[in-house]
Amino acid sequence: MPYKAISDLGEFGLIDRISSLVGPTLDASPNLLTGIGDDCAVYQPTAGMLEVTTTDLLVEKVHFDLLTTPLKHLGSKSISVNVSDICAMNATPQYALIGIAVPPSFSVEMIEELYKGMSHAARIYGVAIAGGDTSVSRSGLFISVTMTGEVSGERLTRRSGAKPGEMICVTGTLGGAAAGLRLLMREKNIMLEHIEHHEPYNKSLMVDLEEYADAIKEQLLPAARIDIIRFFHSRNINPTAMIDISDGLSSDLRHLCNSSGTGAVIHEGRIPVHSGARRIADELRDDALGWSLTGGEDYQLLFTLPKERFPDIAEHDDISIIGEITEKDAGISLVDIYGMSIDLEKLPGYDHFRS
Amino acid sequence: MPYKAISDLGEFGLIDRISSLVGPTLDASPNLLTGIGDDCAVYQPTAGMLEVTTTDLLVEKVHFDLLTTPLKHLGSKSISVNVSDICAMNATPQYALIGIAVPPSFSVEMIEELYKGMSHAARIYGVAIAGGDTSVSRSGLFISVTMTGEVSGERLTRRSGAKPGEMICVTGTLGGAAAGLRLLMREKNIMLEHIEHHEPYNKSLMVDLEEYADAIKEQLLPAARIDIIRFFHSRNINPTAMIDISDGLSSDLRHLCNSSGTGAVIHEGRIPVHSGARRIADELRDDALGWSLTGGEDYQLLFTLPKERFPDIAEHDDISIIGEITEKDAGISLVDIYGMSIDLEKLPGYDHFRS
């Protein structure tokens, strides 16, 4: 069966296909008055709640490589990274607008895969895909997702509320996404070398990726921690400060401390390094702790709480207490397993403009 | 003075520059609680109002050509096209989030020009630039603007409320943007031919663009009709249906009629064709009426009103009544100056995926 060209369908035909794919995400949103098909989406905000809103770009060859990224996963990830930003405000995600610029080489089926992933993820998070914009691109695929959410004034958590003496907590594990990316890049390069040398494809030479599926999943299909936000709301826990770990623990801890006007000390031994990342680091002779600190894309939550709230989080088996907020003068440091202090302010985070 | 490379400044240095450029847009928005510098922007919606939200992509070599587009104008236009969508709901624009993916060849000064244009336009419309995302691009410049606005339930105007017998009205003039684009493309091609043939640049061969400044301005620096929305609100005029003319009168009238379940008849003699477009059409031996119907990018408002509201709009010298809504069965047609009826449902609108 041949693939369908977007030019056969036209812009409005494509929008119809997209509408039917994202339609099921609207079920959970009775306050959406107008979705796709008008100049704007229209919704009724909940009385007394604050609105939060965020936007994230996913750019081909910068944020993803189509040789190693299934389009359905990419669609899902583009939703998750925005949900993660909403969660970082202690808020509940509600509506998404999606802009895509598509290379002419893309088929209708490829676009549908992308939106199937978006729609699937949106339903899991309770997000309604309420509108967007479509265009061709004269080069790579561009995805822009904007998401809104809501939060009460009492629950709203910024980066800026941390105080000296408070616990520094992190959800889940770190370094898995970076490890998964390194592995995918290695396999891609092996594949390209084979193609370049016109060698037959020998599957027995490929590493068994099943073994590393956990880390690869962290890279391709990260999950935003909306479960943690629901846990917070159910226990009436309001972190004093919070940020999602998208640039790496080191860089995002620095953002949180700079916004709060504090320092911090964290302990190497308490950082929840992803077990798959450790195994991949052994295989690639790389450093899993480094990936945790500067690799980025983990989409876990980093937050602070007064010590007296310890019992509230102690029972949660996916939250680690990794250190303590200090006075600003003390700087931001990591104490390694030998007791040596490392200045995290000198450790660079991931910077798209410099790499 | 050499230009500054973005890689020298880094992502966070660039965000600091952007923040200071868009800072002045925040003055008029006391309900914005958190702007750039956290995971989300946070604002307090006005009690009892509906939220409207829209997103538009501007993609290099699809929506703009940097050879003919000053970056400051491009920044301004990226704001205006979103304000136009907000206006089409009879709503007031409030906050913008801006995503940009920038080619590595861009200097810091070029990005600043872009944001100066955005900031200038935002202040004119009363829009606060509240957040965004920055990335490199491995190919062209990519701009994504998302805008929110508010409107009361009584004023909210969709595409779908038009009724047979109502007047079809349009603001301003049409065809200017398409005419300006044709002229810019011609001048660009002349310039490129000169370069290709290594000919010296002979300014006397260039057309005097001053003469056509009006049409070129419609293309490079369109203004959203927030003045019309303010006029509506001041006179308590609520159109029954409205859409902004971004794809061309023919295509956007079709969208309005399809949403409303109606037909329409409009009259060639009443279409407010841009006077500069007429002169350019003469020069290029092209058709100014065609540009008005299918050229797109005029960002005027097309709306419907019951005939008894005629006195309300009669005094406004920038609103034209071009026809009447009919029953669906009557189709969508244009009556030309000879009295012949032309079926507009067969006239294509601009389609990025087909051109």
Image (cartoon, coloured by chain):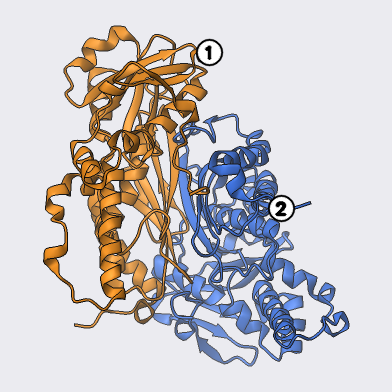
Chain colours: A blue, B orange
Q: Is B99 or B353 nearer to us in this picture?
A: B353
Q: Name the side, left or right, on which B253 lies relative to A302.
A: left
Amino acid residing under circle 1? Asp
Counting from the top left corner in percent of width and height, residue B211 is at: 12, 49
Which residue is pictured at 67% across the width and 89% down the height? A286
Amino acid residing under circle 2? Tyr
Label 2 resides on the chain identified as A
Instruction: Estimate how packed mark 1 is, as few (under 14), some (14 to 19) or many (20 or more) residues with alpha carbons within 10 Å.
Output: few
Q: Secondary structure at mark 2?
A: loop
Q: Secondary structure at mark 1?
A: helix
Label 1 resides on the chain identified as B
Q: Name the side, left or right, on which A159 lies relative to B189.
A: right
Residue B75 sits in quarter = bottom left
Q: Is A245 or A202 nearer to us in this picture?
A: A202
Which residue is pictured at 57% across the width and 40% down the height? A15
Q: Which residue does the numbered mark 2 point to in the structure image?
A: A3
Q: Which residue does the numbered mark 1 point to in the structure image?
A: B329
Q: Is residue B316 above or below residue B95?
A: above
